[in-house]
Amino acid sequence: VEKESSIAMFRSWSAVRGESIRPPTRGVSLITNSWTTAAMGSKKSSEISYADFVQMRSPVSRFVLSPSSRIRDFMDALSIVVLAYDLTTIPYVLAFEPEDTDFSISANIFAAFFWTIDMLLGFITGYDVQG
């Protein structure tokens, strides 16, 4: 019975999205997983949206950032500022070799840390499939 309800959920999601999603194979049931049941709360299987399904597919999915999250929006806006700094200072330093100041040292360290963190966040940021 639970396997049939899982397949019915897959069919309803595919009808809403206009695409075909294959039901799980090898006897996997969404309803029997404890983390899925906890994520569903009091919702019935027919009331769960596709977004709910994607979010509760895996326990690891809670670590995935949405591409439109506040963190990604902030990092994208800050990357414009850091990129503008890099685009102006790198050619200047290479051409004129000025002496290092406290500001230039701390700004270069901040830029290096920023790009490292941005790269690491890129590994855990999701993407829009049809968005």
Image (cartoon, grey):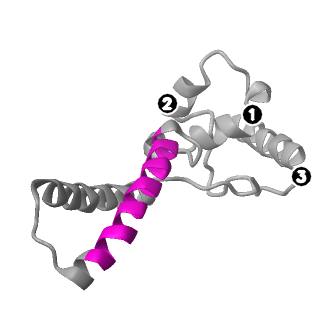
Tell me which numbered mark, 2 or 3, is placed earlier along the sequence. Answer: 3
Q: Secondary structure at mark 3?
A: loop
Q: Residues within 10 Å of mark 3 (few under 14, many from 20)?
A: few
Q: Nearer the viewer, residue 115 or 35?
A: 115
Q: Amino acid at mark 1?
A: Ser
Query: Of discs 2 and 3, which sits in the foreground?
Result: 3
31 w.r.t. 95: above or below = above
Residue underneath mark 1: 49
Magenta segment, which residues? Answer: 71-92
98 w.r.t. 5: above or below = below
Q: Nearer the viewer, residue 21 or 120?
A: 120
Check the picture and name the quadrant holding the N terminus: top right
Query: Of discs 1 and 2, which sits in the foreground?
Result: 1
Residue underneath mark 2: 34
Tell me which numbered mark, 1 or 2, is placed earlier along the sequence. Answer: 2
Label annotation for residue 18? 3
Q: Residues within 10 Å of mark 1 (few under 14, many from 20)?
A: some
Instruction: Please check the rendered image and state whether residue 112 is part of the magenta-colored stretch, yes or no.
Output: no
State yes or no: discs 1 and 2 in contact (Cβ < 8 Å). Answer: no
Distance between the alpha carbons at the discs numbered 2 and 3? 29 Å
Q: Position of residue 120 (x, y in %)?
A: 35, 58
Q: Amino acid at mark 2?
A: Ser
